[in-house]
Image: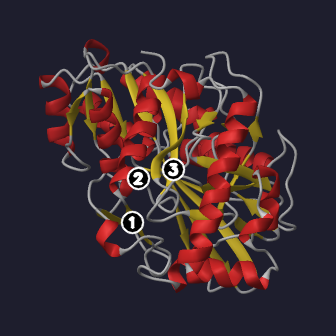
Amino acid sequence: MKYYQYEIETASRDEISAIQSERLVKTVRRIYDNVPLYRKRMEDSGVCPDDIKSIEDIEKLPFTSKQDLRDTYPFGMFAVPQSEVVRLHASSGTTGKQIVVGYTQNDLDIWADICARALAAIGATKEDRVQIAYGYGLFTGGLGIHGGSQRLGCATIPISSGNTARQLTVMQDFGVSVLACTPSYGMYLAESAKKEGIDTNKLPLRAGIFGAEPWTEEMRAQIEKSLGIKAYDIYGLTEIMGPGVAYECECQNGMHVNEDHFIIEIIDPETGKHVPDGEKGEIVFSAISKEAFPILRFRTKDIGVITHEKCACGRTFVRMSKPMGRTDDMLIIRGVNVFPSQVETVLLQNGYQPNYQILVDREGLLDTLEVAVEFPPERFTDKVSEISRMEKELANKLKSLLGVAAKVSLVTPGTIERSEGKAKRVVDKRKL
């Protein structure tokens, strides 16, 4: 199965724009009438619903930030009565109050559809068995993909995250053909399978759909090689819907945004103005079909680019790149901008596994940057001179790309803590 909803996935740009315009106009009126924060923001900006006549007017609307959602915790952004909310999800809340989002039954139906589109785009059909190793619960990952898998008719295995030994048993005994989890956990499963002597190339497993954390093309190559599959990206945010906002097809050349439900903009993070296709900027999303928790011009803090060029797969939805970092997890080290994804790229290009941690500290007035990374098992040595040589070689490679010196510490394989969810890549000990 190549498409789940052929007509909309291959609609013309005029058709897509017409749908977006109609839904944007209705959403603006609804949130103005039902969400006090939006009404006040619009009034403060001198904008009323009648000013929004099409998608061309979206720049007249104010932005929404994560802080706005924290300030209205828990239900201040809901646009329907509580009696119409059938499910609640929430973000992890690791940097403040958690973000609480709600769904009507229609919202859940749309969510299932867009995740079914994502699975169909990677070739999944009702003949597949899908092992969902994303976490279930308030996190949107597990239940989001679950809904899409069931909607597509796949045999859905809701194993959730963790218990790696059981994951591998299920993968073998149930004949799993599609895996859904975070990329770092996908690598951990591959590593664990190798230790257990499991040859994943001999299993029915053929595709994986990975998201919820940044990952590089080099990491994709590692996952594909180690699991013997094709690895596809899926993008989403709790605030917008969850997984399924955008997804890769078989071309693996950018993620298609479900434009009938979401409007994507790329802006200059400093000025807030649109930037042209192909130019890096901050990704901004508006959810234009959600009933319980509509959101307009949400600043994701993800950095990316988009293209409106038609994809070879036949889909006409705009494509977005993998996030190229974030405006808020960007590290500024001695005046230089450093993204964890840059470090990962260097490691993978030089034969290291993506098992690493970035340690940032401050000695006096000087920032320090250290990268702890595991030895590749096949290159492990206890010779001090060889360790020193390898550390220096990798440090030079990092400095060449990052533009700032980093100390490299090679550690014994298996000593950096593994994650069964999102990997914790950065420890910043500075008191900034």
Dividing the image into 4 quarters, which one contains the N terminus?
top left
> Residue 82's spot in the image, x, y percent?
33, 74
Which numbered dot is residue 236?
A: 3
Q: CA distance from mark 2 to mark 1?
A: 9 Å
Q: Are the residues at dot 2 and dot 1 in contact (C-beta closer than 8 Å)?
A: yes
Marks 3, 1: nearer the viewer: 1
Residue pointed to by mark 2: 107
Q: CA distance from mark 3 to mark 2?
A: 15 Å
| Mark found first going from the N terminus, 3 or 2 | 2
The amino acid sitting under disc 3 is Gly
Regarding mark 2 in the picture, which secondary structure is present there? helix
Dividing the image into 4 quarters, which one contains the C terminus?
bottom right
> Residue 262's spot in the image, x, y percent?
60, 48
Name the residue located 61 percent from the left edge and 17 percent from the top edge.
Answer: 313
> Residue 24's spot in the image, x, y percent?
66, 55
| 47 vs 287: above or below | below
Which numbered dot is residue 13?
A: none
| 287 vs 16: above or below | below
Rendering quarter of residue 227: top left
Residue pointed to by mark 1: 102
Choose between 128 and 23: the one closer to the eye: 23
